[in-house]
Image (spheres, rainbow, N blue to C red):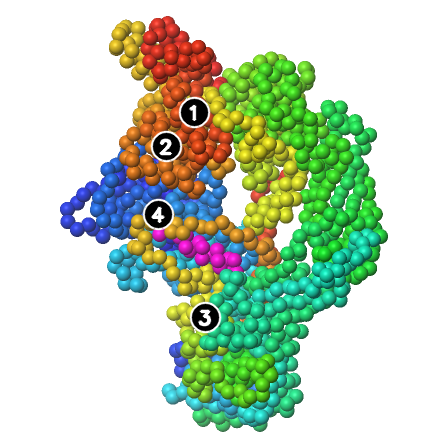
């Protein structure tokens, strides 16, 4: 396992190195004084580093010869915590073998490590590529320092998006003395606070390359206090790189800005170097000085000082408190004095601490008043206020009116002036870094005009039900508009009356509302319009952002009949729960019957569905019940799922819908051409995997599918992948996407999945990103998020275990057996073990035979766990075990939901393997408790796991962790392998399921299909009620079985490997 | 550059001299410094002006000091000993200043704009209304002296001083008032006292209680040479103590940075205490303070920054520079399509 660390070298970019758990933890002891630097004993060597694809794809950039830091791979001297002559592991590093604790004093010592070097351009590419959840195939963990660098790079990207950058001449010179053009962040307000938070969160490891010999503070004990300068350098460099990257995407290459500009001085060369990868330019030194000075003079006002002016808009004093509303013929008569005086009050505040402020009145009273300790007798606040007002008035000249008095405290405005301030002045002043405080009703949707779209189906009301009344995306509906102020609909007359007031801000029924003349006119136009449009267009109307000057925001879209139920977004609750068809042999819980009704309802409308229930709520059974309800001759359903789930679907289908004809389309010998068409014709459900769906895209597209279902739909979250494109291109009358991951959190994923279920509903990916993903994910725009929810809501059914209406349906403890497939490698190993051991068992007896039987059991269970568990060869884990693949999928959902899990195994060494693999796979700390852990360490682990931000995964050996502990922070328990003793397993399960647990606990017991695991599980289930004592004691009873019975028990059944 | 007046020879190079910021075209960006340069150009001879301008750009002016009634400068010519230059102008009498101060105190507008670095055009009218003329109208108002042997007035040394003076006014319009008799600190202190008197309604004679201007500025004159940090430390109330201004920067920008740049991340972090590495050796690998949740940011027009800033100096392209940069800012907020955007039609 590798833990990858990032070290920032001020002025020289990023160096990446790694700890390798497979290397010895100890440096060789040498007599005498420790040298100044030694090779790090367990730092990964260069070949290992260059083998990591994400890291090395970008090294090419680092060796671009136009940059001075073109070292590429190199070694770097780091100062790392050291104890007893060896460097101390980072907390992310997991070793398979426990080492004796190091002794001695903890100090810093120099260690030389191999590292990949990146200049700032390459560093930005790398850090941006590392942003987001780790790639499942990634086999290394990012250290906290590297994760911090990723945060800074993301922040730089946001600053660039918002245009908070300015071009400068950098202080740094090229070794050949050429100056450098650079983009630098301009930080004001909240951005200052954030960069300070980033600086406080800087892990010291990022500064490990700082050299104590050049320590300005003269400290000899270790690297110097370079924190702030280093943070500034990282952000500056990332901002420059991000700006250049953004400009390069828009095809502004070197020189793009210089064309047609001035021809003399340093400016043209500087402008040319602001775009393109090469920041260096050639200019006369004096001219560069002039340029630098001029730029500084020009940009000086942009940042403002540490103390800023604040502007607070105060409404005219209302009279409604005293007088209950008069009139309300329409309820719309404006109340209050239309000529009321609005006021913008002035004050001073600390730039990044708006709570520390003084009003202008206080400042004029006391000429040495202190604003956050930054003004006072030596820094008179009156002049600071005046200077700030002077700067603000340059942006918003209307302020000049207030400055005509000796000691201005505020600016009086009429309604129109206040409206201009709200719409134009306030956003401008705020963005320029001034404090702005606006009344709460502004920006509230109820305070402005909005439009509601009402649609009526073409068919007569009442017939749009069941399977008869398909609506479909292309069906036409009649529509008309309604214009409303908040909840209150307005007639054309009322709208005209409001327009006649000719004032943009009116107090109605106690609250202020915005009456933009252009929007009033737009409202009148809407009221006169009506006509017909398609369902797809109807749904898309709500997507438009109505916050422009002459359009109205769409508040609501409603319709009658089934479409109305759909648009209301609560179809699931309104529909009558459906009973599963008689061909479905299981029973459905009430919420599952509602889910079935919802699926049938959307199908009846000809619309695609996304079933996104929380994991453990039974998406599979709902879907099987739905499939079972298809009338005969409907045509086949294609179900695409990950390889690891094919067997599960097969078994569940056999269990709940035995009449369903299932065909698995997978494996090298899968049917092709006419044979395939024939097979499909005879099947009701065709199972295939994503990779086959991509490979056989053409063949699959030739079938007239009744329905296409994608399970674990996050597999197509990346819209550009071949799998996603192939699946989207499959023709089908009905589409269902099934996912347990909360799709609404990652909007790009949501788009891609919706593009499968209801193509085109969310528009093009680019416009979706611009209108939704950026505002919601970057700017936390809740209104946009609500609008998106309104549009997607009807098509997504997501019920949570925490939902009280669901919980009442659920047992306290949800136990399920998870059947996993073997991989081909596992199956081959399994057969070898069975053949060899049975031969030996046959020729033995007594104690020896018993021992051999138990050893066989152990070895087979190890094979089922993982080939590397049996072989103990330290070979890599990914892709070789069906259990591990299934475990990863389950943990993906657990972690995505922010929940925690306990993983029980009876083998301490497999626990070690799991811990190392899972922490690398998820980039999260994984705890491991086995018999060798002392009490103090065990208590620490339990406390950390139970704390809210503690590690989410805890691997426990059944013996060490099975009793005594309270681990109620987990609500998932996985028994990765089995003890066959329900009492022991229940006791282990009860670590999570005990007093203090507030959630339902999901318990999963893994068994491998077709192996003795599955057969023993079945035997225990059969006999449990009758003779618990027979099988109650672990595996001993197996040793008493006859050899023939053993042969049956151990034999690998067909279907163990999903073909 | 060859010198046609061989007897004067080439001017000696000055290290650390004050250098005009503009490299081409007219000197002086703001309307008020242009007004001032116009006065000079109205009576001076062409070649000397041109040569004075190149002196100013070459950094031949060793120092320039503004004091009430006179500006003194030291200009390096071709001889080893630099020339002493003096430009005198009558200061406004005390009663004029009293009336002006009363007017200025009555409207915050003037102080606000001056403190923000502007000289509002109305200020000239206000001076005129009390019978004072802010800008010199002709050569006879100015008493010009230079220790050089050139008989012409103004000589190129005087002209160089004039040009640099214009840039001093650009950077700080208070210097123009200083020349006319009121130092910035004195003026601001007086205005504060007048405001206080007006608000408390008393007629008491305002007594100086602000910072002593002599202490703050070191005498009657103010060096505009290499005193950046000094200047920054002076209590000028502009709220930007950390930002020093143009000419100082130019004089010292060859090498050591003078002050924290307004742009760039360092400014936001200046003064933030970060922990020493050796003190955190036991918490070396982890964030000392976890990152809080990211507060939401306001989506802004990426061009806003360009609008907020005034016009850049002529030397770097003036308003044209903004036009060219706008092209870059426009694409910053424009996410570019990354392909696979076309929704596939419903089959």
Label 2 sits on a secondary structure element that is loop
Q: Visible in this render: residue B247?
A: no
Residue A618: % across, % down: 55, 25
Q: Are marks 4 and 3 in contact (CB under 8 Å)?
A: no
Residue at mark 2 to residue at mark 3: CA–CA distance:
59 Å
| Residue A377 magenta-highlighted | no
Spatial separation of the CA atoms under disc 1 and disc 2: 26 Å
Q: Please tell me which residue is depicted at 44% across the width and 42% down the height of the picture.
A: A948
| Labels 4 and 3 in the same subunit | yes
Name above or below for residue B45 compared with residue A459: below
Q: Same chain for the residues at labels 1 and 2, yes or no? A: yes
- C-alpha gap between disc 2 and disc 4: 29 Å
Callout 3: chain: B
Q: Helix or strand or loop: what does disc 3 sit on? A: loop
Q: Are marks 2 and 3 on the same chain?
A: no
In the picture of the structure, the residue carrying the numbered disc 1 is: A883
Find disc 2 in the rendering and name its residue: A965
Residue B180: image quadrant is bottom right
Discs 4 and 1 carry the same chain letter? no
Image location of residue A790, percent across then percent down: 66, 40
Q: Which residues are magenta?
A: A180-204
């Amino acid at each position: 396992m590798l833990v990858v660390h990032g070290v920032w070298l001020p002025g020289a970019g990023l160096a990446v190195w790694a700890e390798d758990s497979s290397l010895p933890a100890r440096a060789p002891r040498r007599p005498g004084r420790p040298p100044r630097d030694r090779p790090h004993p367990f730092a990964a060597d260069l070949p290992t580093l260059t083998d990591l694809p994400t890291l090395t794809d970008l090294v090419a950039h680092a060796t671009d010869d136009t940059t001075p830091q073109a070292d590429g791979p190199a070694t770097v001297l780091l100062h790392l915590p050291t104890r007893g002559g060896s460097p101390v592991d980072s907390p992310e590093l997991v070793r398979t073998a426990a080492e004796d604790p190091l002794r001695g004093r903890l100090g810093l010592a120099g260690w030389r490590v191999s590292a990949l070097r990146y200049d700032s351009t390459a560093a930005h590419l790398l850090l941006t590529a590392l942003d987001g959840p780790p790639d499942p195939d990634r086999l290394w963990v990012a250290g906290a320092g590297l994760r911090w660098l990723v945060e800074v790079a993301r922040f730089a990207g946001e600053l660039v998006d918002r245009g908070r950058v300015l071009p400068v001449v950098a202080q740094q010179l090229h070794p050949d003395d050429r100056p450098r053009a650079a983009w630098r962040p301009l930080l004001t307000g909240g951005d200052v606070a954030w960069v300070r938070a980033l600086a406080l969160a800087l892990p010291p490891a990022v500064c490990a390359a700082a050299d104590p010999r050049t320590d300005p503070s003269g400290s000899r004990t270790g690297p110097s206090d370079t924190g702030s300068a280093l943070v500034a350098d990282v952000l500056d460099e990332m901002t420059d790189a991000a700006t250049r990257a953004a400009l390069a995407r828009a095809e502004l290459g070197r020189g793009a800005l210089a064309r047609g500009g001035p021809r003399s001085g340093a400016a043209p060369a500087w402008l040319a170097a602001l775009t393109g990868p090469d920041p260096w330019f050639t200019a006369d030194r004096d001219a560069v000085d002039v340029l630098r000075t001029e730029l500084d003079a020009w940009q000086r006002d942009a940042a403002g000082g540490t103390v800023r002016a604040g502007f607070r808009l105060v409404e005219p004093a209302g009279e409604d408190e005293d007088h209950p509303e008069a009139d309300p013929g329409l309820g719309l008569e404006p109340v209050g004095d239309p000529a009321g005086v609005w006021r913008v009050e002035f004050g001073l505040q600390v730039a990044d601490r708006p709570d520390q402020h003084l009003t202008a009145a206080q400042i004029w009273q006391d000429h040495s008043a202190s604003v956050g300790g930054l003004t006072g007798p030596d820094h008179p606040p009156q002049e600071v206020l005046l200077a700030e007002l002077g700067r603000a008035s340059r942006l918003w000249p209307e302020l000049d009116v207030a400055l005509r008095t000796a000691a201005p405290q505020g600016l009086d405005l009429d309604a129109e002036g206040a409206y201009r301030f709200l719409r134009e002045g306030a956003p401008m002043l705020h963005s320029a870094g001034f404090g702005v405080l606006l009344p709460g009703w502004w920006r509230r949707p109820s305070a402005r005009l909005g439009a509601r779209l009402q649609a009526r189906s073409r068919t007569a009301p009442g017939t749009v039900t069941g399977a008869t009344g398909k609506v479909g995306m292309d069906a036409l509906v009649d529509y008309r508009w309604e214009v409303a102020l908040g909840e209150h609909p307005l007639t054309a007359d009322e709208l005209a009356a409001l327009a006649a007031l000719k004032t943009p801000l009116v107090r109605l029924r106690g609250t202020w509302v915005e009456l933009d003349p252009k929007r009033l006119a737009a409202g009148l136009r809407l009221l006169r319009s009506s006509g017909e449009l398609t369902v797809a267009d109807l749904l898309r109307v709500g997507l438009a952002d109505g916050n422009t000057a002459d359009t109205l925001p769409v508040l609501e879209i409603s319709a009658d009949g089934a479409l109305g139920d759909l648009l209301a977004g609560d179809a699931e609750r309104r529909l009558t729960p459906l009973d599963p068809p008689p061909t479905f042999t299981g029973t459905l819980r009430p919420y599952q019957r509602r889910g079935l009704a919802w699926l049938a309802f959307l199908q009846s409308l000809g619309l695609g569905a996304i079933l996104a229930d929380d994991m453990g709520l039974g998406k599979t059974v709902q879907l099987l019940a739905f499939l079972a309800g298809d009338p005969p001759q409907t045509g086949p359903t294609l179900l695409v799922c990950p390889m690891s789930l094919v067997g599960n679907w097969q078994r569940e289908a056999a269990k709940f819908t035995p009449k369903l004809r299932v065909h698995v389309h997978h494996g090298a010998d899968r049917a092709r051409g006419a044979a395939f068409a024939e097979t499909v014709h005879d099947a009701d459900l065709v199972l295939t995997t994503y990779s086959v769906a991509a490979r056989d895209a053409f063949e699959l597209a030739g079938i007239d599918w009744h329905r296409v279902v994608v399970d674990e739909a996050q597999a197509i979250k990346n819209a550009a992948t071949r799998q996603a494109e192939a699946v989207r291109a499959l023709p089908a009358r009905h589409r269902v996407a099934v996912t347990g991951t909360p799709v609404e959190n990652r909007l790009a994923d949501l788009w891609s999945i919706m593009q499968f279920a209801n193509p085109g509903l969310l528009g093009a990916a680019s416009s979706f990103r611009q209108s939704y993903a950026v505002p919601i994910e970057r700017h936390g725009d809740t209104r946009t998020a609500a609008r998106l929810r309104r549009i997607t809501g009807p098509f997504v059914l997501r019920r949570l275990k925490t939902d009280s209406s669901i919980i009442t349906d659920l047992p306290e403890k949800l136990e399920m057996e998870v059947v996993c497939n073997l991989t081909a490698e596992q199956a081959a190993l399994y057969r070898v073990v069975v053949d060899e051991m049975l031969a030996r068992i046959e020729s033995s007896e007594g104690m020896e035979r018993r021992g051999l039987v138990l050893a066989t059991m152990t070895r087979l269970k190890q094979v089922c766990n993982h080939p590397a568990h049996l072989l103990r060869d330290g070979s890599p884990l990914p892709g070789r075990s069906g259990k591990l693949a299934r475990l990863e999928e389950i943990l993906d959902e657990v972690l995505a939901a922010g929940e925690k899990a306990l993983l029980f195994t009876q083998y301490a060494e497999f626990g070690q393997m799991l811990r190392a693999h899972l922490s690398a796979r998820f980039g999260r700390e994984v705890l491991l408790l086995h018999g060798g852990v002392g009490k103090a360490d065990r208590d620490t682990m339990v406390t950390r796991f139970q704390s809210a931000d503690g590690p989410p995964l805890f691997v426990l050996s059944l013996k060490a962790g099975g009793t005594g502990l309270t681990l109620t922070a987990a609500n998932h328990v996985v028994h990765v392998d089995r003890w066959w003793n329900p009492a022991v397993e229940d006791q282990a399960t009860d670590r999570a399921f005990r007093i203090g647990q507030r959630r339902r606990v999901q318990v999963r017991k893994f068994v491998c299909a077709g192996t003795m695991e599955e057969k023993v599980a079945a035997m225990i289930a059969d006999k449990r009620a009758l003779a618990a004592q027979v099988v109650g004691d672990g595996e001993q009873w197996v040793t008493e079985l006859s050899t023939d019975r053993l042969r049956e028990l151990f034999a690998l059944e067909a279907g163990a490997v999903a073909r | 550059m060859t010198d046609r007046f061989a007897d004067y020879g080439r001017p000696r190079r000055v290290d650390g001299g004050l250098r005009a910021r503009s490299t081409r075209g007219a000197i002086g960006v703001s309307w008020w410094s242009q007004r001032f340069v116009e006065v000079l150009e109205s009576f001076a001879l062409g070649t000397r002006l041109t040569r004075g301008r190149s002196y100013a750009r070459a950094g031949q002016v060793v120092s320039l000091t503004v004091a009430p009634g006179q500006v003194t400068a030291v200009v390096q010519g071709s001889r080893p000993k630099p020339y002493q230059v003096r430009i005198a102008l009558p200061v406004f009498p005390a009663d004029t200043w009293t009336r002006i101060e009363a007017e200025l105190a009555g409207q915050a507008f003037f102080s606000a704009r001056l403190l923000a670095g502007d000289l509002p055009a109305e200020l000239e009218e206000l001076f005129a209304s009390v019978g004072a003329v802010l800008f010199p109208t002709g050569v006879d108002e100015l008493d010009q002296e230079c220790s050089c042997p050139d008989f012409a007035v103004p000589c190129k040394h005087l002209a160089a001083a004039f040009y640099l003076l214009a840039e001093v006014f650009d950077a700080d319009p208070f210097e123009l008032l200083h020349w006319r008799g009121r130092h910035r600190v004195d003026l601001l202190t007086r205005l504060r006292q007048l405001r206080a008197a007006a608000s408390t309604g008393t007629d008491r004679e305002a007594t100086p209680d602000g910072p002593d201007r002599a202490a703050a500025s070191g005498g009657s004159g103010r060096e505009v040479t290499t005193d950046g940090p000094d200047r920054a430390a002076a209590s000028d109330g502009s709220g930007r103590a950390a930002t020093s201004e143009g000419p100082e920067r130019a004089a010292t920008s060859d090498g050591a940075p003078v002050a924290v740049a307004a742009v760039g991340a360092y400014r936001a972090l200046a003064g933030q205490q970060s922990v020493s590495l050796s003190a955190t050796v036991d918490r070396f690998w982890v964030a000392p303070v976890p990152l809080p949740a990211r507060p939401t940011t306001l989506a802004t027009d990426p061009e806003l920054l360009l609008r907020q800033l005034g016009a850049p100096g002529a030397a770097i392209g003036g308003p044209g520079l903004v036009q060219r940069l706008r092209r870059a800012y426009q694409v910053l907020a424009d996410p570019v399509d990354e392909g696979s955007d076309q929704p596939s039609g419903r089959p």
